[in-house]
Image (cartoon, rainbow, N blue to C red):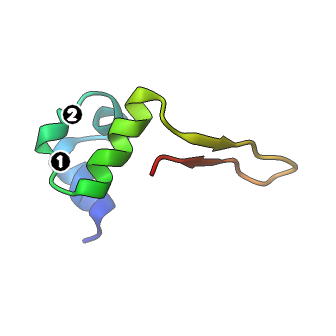
Amino acid sequence: MGMYMDSVNKYGSEFDILRNVNLKYIDNEDLRKGIENIREGNVSLTAGYDGVFGIIKAL
């Protein structure tokens, strides 16, 4: 399984992971840092347009 499915199976939904899971329980350093950045609002946002998705960079 990939990191996504491993994380969802271990911690719950994406929303729970982003909002509620204690960062000390997240083993992957990049994932932990990305979630920490999102929680603190340290992200780069690029708006989407004309059917093109926007981009959120958390690392």
> Do the residues bearing badges 2 and 1 touch, measured as CB atoms within 8 Å?
yes
- Look at 33% across and 29% down and name the residue there: 19
Residue 1 appears at what percent x and percent y? Answer: 25, 71
Residue 30 appears at what percent x and percent y? Answer: 31, 56
The crowding category of the residue bearing disc 2, from other C-alpha atoms within 10 Å (few below 14, some 14 to 19, many at least 20), is: some
Looking at the picture, does residue 33 appear above or below residue 18? below
Mark 2: which secondary structure? loop
Mark 1: which secondary structure? loop
Residue 32 appears at what percent x and percent y? Answer: 27, 47
Task: Name the amino acid, label 2.
Answer: Val
- Look at 38% across and 47% down and name the residue there: 34
Residue placed under numbered mark 2 in the picture: 21
Task: Name the amino acid, label 1.
Answer: Ile
Q: Nearer the viewer, residue 3 or 26?
A: 26
Residue placed under numbered mark 1 in the picture: 26
- Label of residue 13 in the image: none
Q: Is residue 5 left or right of residue 45?
A: left
Figure quadrant of residue 2: bottom left
